[in-house]
Amino acid sequence: MQHTRRHALKSLSMGTGSFLLTPFLTQVQLQAAGNASALPKRFVFVVKSSGIVPEGVTPEPFAGEEARNESLADVPLPKSMAALEPFKDQLSIVQGLSGKMCRGGHSSWFGAMGVYMTGGEHDRGAILRATADAELAKLNPAPFNHVGLAVRGPALSKSFGGVLYPGITATAANKELPFQGSPDLAFEQLFGSAISASGQGQKRFRTQKDLLDFMVDDIRKVNEAIPSAEKNKLDAYLNAFEELQVRHSRLTDMRDRIKTNAPAFDDKFKSDIEEVRQEAHFDLASAALIAGLTNCVTLRLDNLSTVYSDLGLAKHNHGIGHNESSRSQEECRNIIRKHHCGLLADMAGKLKAVPEGDGTMLDNTMIIFFSDSANKHHGDCFEWPYVVLGGCGGKLNIPGRYIRYPKYGDSGCRTIGNWWTTLLNAFGNPIEHYGNEDLVLKQNDSSYRGPLNDLIT
C-alpha cells in the first residue's frame, strides 16, 4: 500500500459519521478543490546545546559580516551540511540576529524561544510567557497539540530517559512543556491507540477511555447540584477533561491512519546510544506529522552531558566546548553537525515524499535548527544562527536564500524578537512584538519593534 497522506485521508473518510471528524473531512474537501489555505502548517523546532558557531553554517562565498540576501542555488554548502544539498531550494540560513535581551552562557533556558533573560547556570528561572513554539502550536491544533521529544534534560544535567524538563519550552507563564526522553515510551504514547510494541498500549488506551468517560459524566452530574457561584471552577475542570476525552476519541477514529504511518518498531527505540535515540526521535516526529497526530514538534537533541561516542568522540559536549578533546573543537563540531544535518535531511526526505495539495508535506512545513545558547559554547548572544528547511507554507520568502542582517549595533540590525514576531505574524498571530526589547539598542535608538517584513510573503 502506498503510504501517502492523500490515501490515508481517503481511507479515513469511509464508514464514519463521527462529528469529531467533521472539520477533518471538510479539510479533505477543500484540499481536493485545490484550496491551499486548508492545508495545515507544521513546525519542527530542533534545539541543540553548546551553541551553533556561525562560521560552521556559512557557505564560503558568504563569509564575513556583510549584510546580504542571496540565493543558495549555485553556492556549495559547508561540508558538514552536505546532506542538505538536495533540499537547497527549500533551505534557508538566517544570520546576524542578536539576542542580548536573553541570558548567555551554557543555556538561555526559555529565553531562546521566549525572548527574555532568565535563570542561571543550574537554575531555569522564571517562566514569563508561552514560548514561540508553543504559540505557533496553538495556531495549528491537532490531537497532540505540541509534542516534546528530548534525549537529555537541562543543559548541565545528567537526566536521561522518561519525562524530562529541558527548560526550553513553555505553554504559558510558569507552565513548562514536558518532553518524553524515552523513544519506546514516546512510541506508546503517540501510536498506542492503534498499535503497541509491548502489547499493553491498546489495553492501557481502553482503560484511559473508560476513566475519562466516567470522570466527565461524574463532573457533569456534580455540576448540576452545586451552587452557581462554584460552577465556574468546576467548568474549568470539565473543560480540561472534555479536551482529553475529545483527543482520545479523535485518536480512536484515526486508528487506521495511525497504523498506516507509524514507524516500524525496532531496537533503535530501546537503545541507550545517544545518536540512535536521536534518530528514533526524528522517526517518531516524522511519523506523527505524517499521520496528522500533531502539527508541532520540539526536539531537544542533546545537552552538555551528551557524549557522541558512536561518532568517535570521547568527550561530552561540555568538554568539547572547553577544548578538552584530543581533536579540535572545530573538527568535533563539524562531525556532530554532519550527523545532525543527516537527521534533518532524512526528515525532510520523508515529508517531501508525501503528496499534499499541489506539492508535498515539506512545502507546508518549517523545520528550524538552532541552539539554546546562541552562537558558541558560552553564548554571548551577539548572533543567533538559524538553519531552516521546508517551504514554510508559502508564508515566508526565505526558502533557497542566505540572509545575513547587519551586525549588532549597526544600522538595520535586528533581534530574535523580530524573528519570532515575524513567524507569529506570518502564520496567523498579528502580535505587535513578541518578547523583550534589547534595552541597549533601545537606549541608542537602534531598537526595532515588529516583524521582519522583508521576510513575509
Image (spheres, helix red, strand yellow):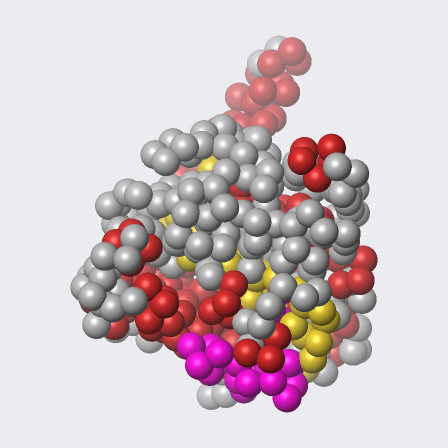
Q: Is residue 167 left or right of residue 352?
A: left
The answer to whether residue 219 is magenta is no
- The front one of 157 and 9 is 157
Q: Is residue 242 above or below residue 139?
A: above
In which quarter of the view is residue 324 placed? bottom left
Q: Is residue 376 left or right of residue 308?
A: right
| Residue for point 55% across, 78% down | 60
| Residue for point 49% across, 78% down | 78
- The front one of 446 and 355 is 446
Q: Is residue 57 above or below residue 386?
A: below
| Magenta region, residue range | 72-94
| Residue for point 49% across, 55% down | 375
Q: Position of residue 400 (x, y in %)?
A: 66, 78
Q: Is residue 112 above or below residue 54?
A: above
Q: Position of residue 203 (x, y in %)?
A: 30, 54
Q: Position of residue 255 (x, y in %)?
A: 46, 66
Total marks placed: 0
Q: Is residue 156 left or right of residue 398?
A: left
Q: Position of residue 96 (x, y in %)?
A: 63, 58
- The front one of 352 and 405 is 405
Question: Does the rendering let one see residue 241?
Answer: no
Question: Does the rendering let one see residue 225?
Answer: yes
Q: Is residue 385 above or below residue 114?
A: below
- The front one of 330 and 132 is 330
